[in-house]
Image (spheres, helix red, strand yellow):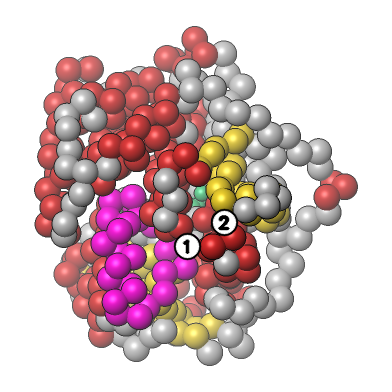
Amino acid sequence: MKRIIILGATGSIGRQALNIISRHPESFMVAGLSAHHDTDGLLEAAELYGTRQTCLSGSRSNLVRYSGSEGLLTLIRDTDADMVLNAVAGADGLAPSFEAIRSGKDLALANKETIVMAGRLVMEAAQVLGTKIVPVDSEHSAIFSMVERFGASSLKSVIITASGGAFRDYPLEKLATVTPADALAHPTWNMGAKITVDSASMANKGLELIEASRLFNLDPDRINVVIHPESRVHSFIRTLDGSLYAQMSRPDMRIPILNAFSWPEYIEESVADMDPTDIAMHFYNPDLKRYPLLGLAFSALADGEGACTAYNAANEVAVEAFMREQIRFPGIYDIVAGTLDTNFQSRLDDIDAVMAVDSMARTMAESIVKEHQ
Ligand code: NDP
Ligand code: MG
């Protein structure tokens, strides 16, 4: 029986994780839960899954055991558990990831920001402390399970697949007038708001290629991105002999969540079974004019750790501004590109250095948002 703490339990990943635990009560149990503001959602889940280890990280409440961002770290530290699923949205997920590693718990990692901001530091800490990081992001889960089978030394390169998001087939000139509601209409995946907007701009794929580079120790020239509208192949790996291997299922995040929970075993589940005769699959190269944030992520990766942290921070600020209708959709790129005009350090030695770049990039991005209004 694996005891699992779920951070961000009221979100898209968090709820699917709870569903997986319900489907496999003989294998997993909830050891603790967090939400940011959604008290009702948190208490309902706590009751249903029988835990009193609850934290509301964004508000104070007498109805839960821990509150605030320090409370979230205490929940992780003080709860008897084998694994932490980090399904917090955004840069605030970084500190909880470190706390999970520091307290000797394995980390099922949906919060890709952790790896984009501080991948090398997090991976080094996990190695020193003997904890495992298992990715939940579907592309990285796919690559992870193939690399586990073939061995890292057989890996030549990876190809990350992308749906192309809500605007894949829009005329380019219409992108200046799309609304937040248009961006939230994802063709294949049902996810939280921020990541859905990032799918439309492909900043999500930008974050994911940085994530892949850090998780699997790959230089940028060993990572490629292809558009695959059907979202059945979750990524490819190319082995040294040139063969391509793919992992496929219907698009359902419960599979990567389950595989992270059950690692290193596989357990029986059929929610995303697919039949290859059901669907014709297509693959093509992304147009960087449509998705300039993807090209920018490759440049940030080449520039180093500071640029990657700044890319994430500036994009979070820009997406919030777009959601509040302060800027237009193409403005997201302008804000991230404007922020990355500054030279950031290529190596960030500790978390303080990471947080300093994060906050500097946010300030810069916010001032560019003001110029755009
Ligand atoms: P959601 O917005 O649906 O859920 C976010 C969860 O985190 C909620 O429980 C929310 O609580 C909580 N939360 C929000 N802000 C904070 C904060 N500042 N500190 C602590 N907790 C917070 O997001 P998703 O589930 O879509 O995504 C979560 C993470 O997983 C992201 O990093 C995303 O990139 C990644 N991911 C998501 C995928 C998906 O399919 N959704 C796929 C691959 C990766 P409350 O409800 O109270 O606001
Ligand atoms: Mg993904």
Residue drawn where x is 16% and y is 59% of the image = 350
Residue 164 in percent (x, y) is at 57, 32
Image side of residue 13 versus residue 116, left or right: right
Instruction: Give the image quadrant in which the ligand numbered 1 is located.
Output: bottom left
Span shown in magenta: 109-135
127 within the magenta span: yes
Q: Name the residue under label 2.
A: 155
Residue 198 in percent (x, y) is at 43, 37
Q: Which residue lies furthest to the top in this view?
A: 173
The answer for how far apart the CA atoms under marks 1 and 2 are is: 18 Å
Numbered circle sitting on residue 235 = none
Q: Name above or below for residue 176 compared with residue 352.
A: above
Q: Name the residue under label 1.
A: 135
145 within the magenta span: no
Q: Name above or below for residue 339 compared with residue 241.
A: above
What secondary structure do most residues of the magenta stretch adopt?
Answer: helix
Q: At numbered mark 2, what does the secondary structure look like: helix, strand or loop?
A: strand
Q: Name above or below for residue 185 compared with residue 249.
A: above
Q: Which of marks 1 and 2 is in front?
A: 2
Residue 124 in percent (x, y) is at 30, 67
Q: Which amino acid does label 2 sit on?
A: Leu
- Quadrant showing the C terminus: top left
Q: How many numbered discs, if any?
A: 2
Q: At numbered mark 1, what does the secondary structure look like: helix, strand or loop?
A: strand
